[in-house]
Amino acid sequence: MGSRIRKYLERRQHIKNEQASLDQIPKLSCTGEALRATTAHELAGIFNRPETQPEWTQAEADLKRVCQIEDGTTGGVNPGDRRAVWYLINGLGPKSVLEIGTHVGASTVHIASALKNKQQSDPAINPHLTTVDMEDVNSDSGAFKRYGLAASPRDMIRSIQCDDLVSFVSESSLTFLDRCEDKFDFIFLDGDHSATTVYQEIPRALKALKQDGVILLHDYFPKNRPIWVNGSVIPGPYLGVSRLRKEGAPIKVLPLGELPWPTKLGSRITSLALVSRD
């Protein structure tokens, strides 16, 4: 059996298993009233705005110094996606951000950098990032240690002088969202990518969203088809969103698609996608 056929069959079985697990979860209510009605035109403007380039160039020098995380070795967000997250935070200007899935801190430090950049341009704002992970990401048993990285997420945050902008929480996403009374302008869901968790995270995230807020998904594969040459697919986010939509949730997903810079495997395609009001 050829490797391509084998990967296809493995992918089909993975999707089938994820769907079977998702089918066991009772139906949830879901409202999209707080969501921003984002358009592809607006996103293109954020990524192609000329005045952002010098700001990114300045921030990138700092980030390259502290965030020495290679693509494909740690499970962290790839460099092109990290840049896209920075641009989104910088372009949309949220004051309060929630990240689900700190892991090694690749996206965490980029979000903090973008918030710092906005604060420098407007000292009156007081932005903050809350980043949540199942484990204590900064401990000696954290993912950064297991992957042999020199700096923990907190170390990197300190290195770019963003200590006062970031709070770390060690808790499951569902537990945190159930108890959290805060509201956020921007929520990045990049934790447990299983269909059952994503299906339960999104309605909870919507309740924690401020009016005209944004939810960003990672590892969203439209129609669960590969977007890179390696043929890999993470089916959970697409399956979770699809069930919510089938059940009448007034939401839609805008895959970011091709970015103006490289992402991974020689392409410019990203698996980032915005959840928007339908």
Image (cartoon, rainbow, N blue to C red):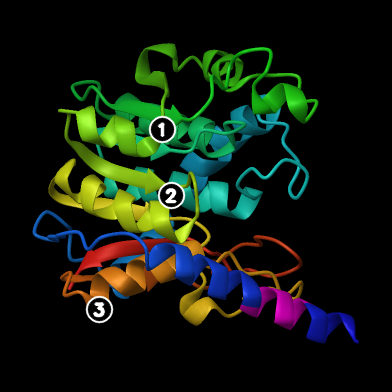
Q: Is residue 85 left or right of residue 278?
A: right
12 shown above or below 233: below
* Residue 263 lies within the magenta run: no
Q: For residue 151, what is the image quadrant?
A: top right
Give the camera-side residue of 62 and 104.
104
* Magenta-tinted stretch: 7-12
* Helix, strand or loop under label 1: loop
In this rendering, would 4 be left or right of 249? right
> What amino acid is labelled 1 in the image?
Ser
Disc 1 target residue:
172
Task: Find numbered disc 3 in the image and state the secondary structure of the residue it sits on.
Answer: helix
Badge 2 crowding class, 10 Å Cα cut-off, few under 14, some 14 to 19, many 20 or more, is many
Q: Residues within 10 Å of mark 3 (few under 14, many from 20)?
A: few
Residue 208, x across and y down, in percent: 18, 40
Q: Position of residue 149 (x, y in %)?
A: 76, 25
**If you read the primary sequence from the N terminus, does the residue marked by circle 1 or circle 3 appear first?**
1
Q: Left or right? Give the position of 107 relative to 68.
A: left
The numbered mark at residue 246 is: 3
- Labels 2 and 3: the sequence-earlier one: 2
Q: Is residue 166 above or below residue 223?
A: above
Quarter of the picture holding the N terminus: bottom right
**Amino acid at the residue labelled 2:** Tyr
**Magenta highlight: main SS:** helix
Locate the C terminus and report the quarter of the image it occupies.
bottom left
Are there few (<14), some (14-19), or many (20+) residues within 10 Å of tag 1? some
